[in-house]
Amino acid sequence: MSKKIKIIVAEDNRNLCQILQDYIQRDDSFELVGVAYNGLEAWELILKNDPDLVIMDLVMPNLDGLEVLERINSRTSVPRPKTIMLTAFGHETLTHQAMVMGVDYFILKPFDLEILGKRIKTLTQDVEISNISLPQTCSALAPAGKGVNISVEVTSMMHQLGIPAHVKGYQYIRDAILMVIEDVSLLGAVTKELYPAIAKKYNTAPSRVERGIRHAIELAWERGHMETLKRIFGYSMNIERQKPTNSEFIALLADKLRVMSKVG
């Protein structure tokens, strides 16, 4: 029997922290050894428990995620825990710094707990769920492959979400997801690179691409089936009250499909 993966969660949003805590405790292969609501508490828990993996927010009180990473990297006497960083749009500079410092994976808020669970298992040497190579950073994730037709899967998922194929935003979203699957760094340059690239293809303006995607998402929320939205968007977003931004929508669907391409 494989030993349990010792996990520490560090997140100053107590509601999200509770969601993460409940999810981890439901999985028999995980052991939650500590919960922290700021970076200093996280560091103290890391010193005390020597976890296999740390899930932490990039922006926290007392010490932020970068400072905790720096302290983790400075320790040479014990094995370095794997690190999953929770991040939000608007933190691209900090995210880049974390990547340089060796964070193992980024997950964009809001996220799907099932994807998080898969990431924990692929990042941890002690749990062998497949023969795929372990990604070192989000930019190292493999592009589409492994027998999964990503174009078909994108179309299927958008159909499930209730986005009508005749609206312009449908094609814009489809292209955006496929581009992000191939090059995840585009998520850090949505307005500067992603929208202009799509606009050029369709001979339109980037602002119209942005509006078209927003309109398509609004249609999905108005016409889509709530249970389908919950299943696809997971538990970290209150979908009855909160629509995702364009960037969050694209990022979450791209990440789901990237997981399928790796384990399919």
Image (spheres, rainbow, N blue to C red):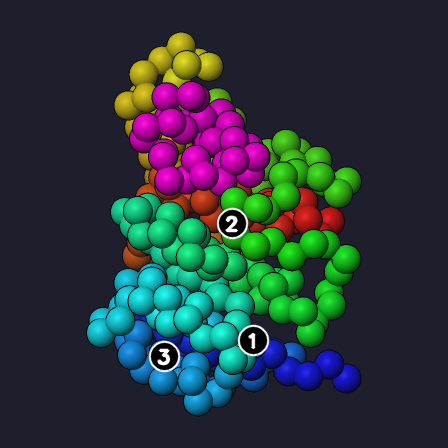
Task: From the viewer's perspective, tell me whether residue 251 is left or right of residue 136.
Answer: left
Q: Main secondary structure of the magenta part?
A: helix
Residue 67 in sight here: yes
Vertical arrangement, residue 247 with respect to residue 263, above or below: above
- Quadrant of the image occupied by residue 147: top right
Identify which amino acid the numbered label 2 is placed on.
Answer: Cys
Q: Which residues lie in the magenta part?
A: 169-198
Label 2 sits on a secondary structure element that is: helix
- Residue 240: assigned label: none
Q: Residue furthest bottom?
A: 48
Q: Please tell me which of labels 3 and 1 falls first in the chain.
A: 3
Label 1 sits on a secondary structure element that is: loop
Q: Which residue is mark 1?
A: 79
Residue 156 in sight here: no
Q: CA distance from mark 3 to mark 1?
A: 15 Å
Give the residue drawn at x 56%, y 75%.
79
Rendered-image quadrant of the N terminus: bottom right
Vertical arrangement, residue 204 with respect to residue 186, above or below: above
**Is disc 2 surrounded by few (<14), some (14 to 19) or many (20+) residues within 10 Å?**
some
**Nearer to the camera, 115 or 133:** 133
**Nearer to the camera, 31 or 248:** 31
- Residue 138: assigned label: 2
- Residue 43: assigned label: 3
